[in-house]
Amino acid sequence: MRLVLFYTFFFLYIFKGFSQTEYFNKRIDLGYVEAAYSIVLADSGYAISGAISQPGNWHKLALTFTDFNGDFLKVKYYEADGHLYPGRSNALSNTKDKGFILATTLQNKNLYEDLLFRFDSNGDTLWTKSVGADTTLDFAGTQIKELENGNLIYLVLGSDITNDYYRIYLTMLDNNGNQIWDKTYGSGVNHYKGYSLDVCNDKGFIIGGQRTIGRYEHPYILKVDSMGNVQWEKTFGTNYTCRYTHCFSGTAYPIQLANGDFFIAEYEVIFQANNGIDYNKSRFIRLNPQGETIWDYYYGPVQLYNYMGFPVELEDGSIICGGQELNYLNKSVGTIFKLSSAGDSLWWRNYYGQPIDSTANNYLRSIKSTNAGGIVGAGFVTKPQDIWIFKVDSMGCEIPLCHVDTTVGIIESAKKDFAFKVYPNPSAGLFNFEYDLLGENEGRLSIYNALGAMVKQEKLLGPAGKMQVEINGSSGSIFFYTFELKGAIVGKGKLILVK
């Protein structure tokens, strides 16, 4: 009886604590075809940068403001003589005057030009700048950050003087957008592309992206000092068997951690199928301040479309990364992965926009930690294509104890006629699972501990079957299980160990 009362009060306490915080999963329809690529904190909630399109082409930037519950407040549109493309993931940054800066790209006929916007807290434009405006070369703005002294560090992807090979451009600007210095990285008959940028403890910078070696385009990072001088560089990836003259191997997204180490989230092509389609796997690497490897791990499934990027370090030293993977219907779903400072997997969750449409794609493009210890994410969802914003707690849950249901946005009991039995329960450690997959040939059983970490995952072969699963733990331990079909949670429950 004491054990039952303890767990009753424990769960009541957990749910009471969660009820004081607003978590959500919402679409924002601006009346067009919309996309979102970055989210940051704003005075009254969140600011989301993206673009809108009428049928045919992207043509306007959109800066959308929501309150802290994800409800729409207002939107600001920005136009230019040509098509304006939103920057890469996390191309929008906060400034110390409570405004924003955004790196974008303008397409005018066949020429691409970087375009940097500075906004006030209301989203009104203070000024725009371009480092490639007076050239006949292609440039694209990818990242922009404000420094402690008010200067700006601006990362641009551009062409070399022959217009044949990409180069990384890094430019220091003052608070009004005037150029202080600029550097170019890359040489020879190789491409160098910069997509991510972080400011380092030594006032230098770490750049992430890609570089080519031969016909392979590999994940690449570059560490420079406060004046843009190269200190060291690293190239990752493998020369897998590739059928083409140009082979994509992956992209690197580095950040510097609070203790001075570097963390790199990247995805790499592991192999290429006979039909020429690439299959990826996520990879996470930790380096010391000199760029030497501390640990290097691959995680997650090998999939047709699977990547991790835009990492964020949390206050406790753990790290979250956002990205994509495919569900059972080969549709894109948002993914957040959390790992410890030692590289141990803590949890991996999938995210869908609301309302659920199993034939839609869900693109997660930016994540940030919140002041209350939660996580906010933004991107876009198709059918129809809308801005997507959601907020979850530190466990990645939109609802309390979501390791009972590991997919945010999935409607509880999605298939009410799904039949299953679990026995004995409680058990000394051996649990029998009987199931009927409703005519499907394959499903998945996942088991999680009370902290949300996955301890077992089994493939279910249909259309019906039975399996025995052994779970280890101390007497009184609680675990949670989910049955999944085609990306939807169709059954779930609790397991109790009694020894």
Image (spheres, helix red, strand yellow):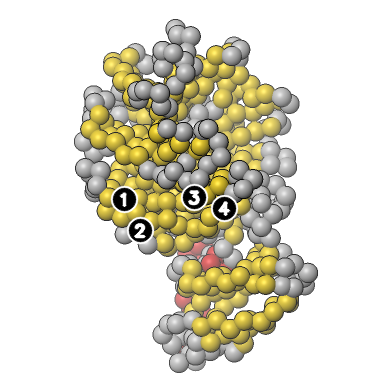
Q: Secondary structure at mark 4?
A: strand
Based on the displayed image, in which of its 4 quarters is residue 84 positioned?
top right
The numbered mark at residue 303 is 4
Gap in angstroms between the C-alphas marked 3 and 1: 20 Å
Name the residue at 60% across, 76% down: 493
Label 1 is placed on what type of residue?
Arg
Amino acid type of the residue that numbered disc 2 sits on in the rendered structure: Gly
Circle 3: residue type: Ile
Q: Which residue is mark 3?
A: 270
Q: Report the Cα–Cα distance between label 1 and label 4.
A: 23 Å
Q: Position of residue 366 (x, y in %)?
A: 50, 41
Residue at x-position 47% and y-position 76%: 10
Q: Secondary structure at mark 2?
A: loop
Q: Mark 1 vs mark 4: which is more N-terminal?
A: 1
Position of 122 relative to 300 (above/below): above
Q: Rounded to the nearest whole Å, what is the CA distance between mark 4 and mark 3?
A: 9 Å
Q: Nearer the viewer, mark 4 or mark 2?
A: 4
Q: Which mark is residue 343?
A: 2
Residue that mark 1 sits on = 286
Q: Comparing marks 2 and 3, which lies closer to the viewer?
A: 3
Which residue lies at the image location 46% right of the left edge and 51% below the top edge?
282
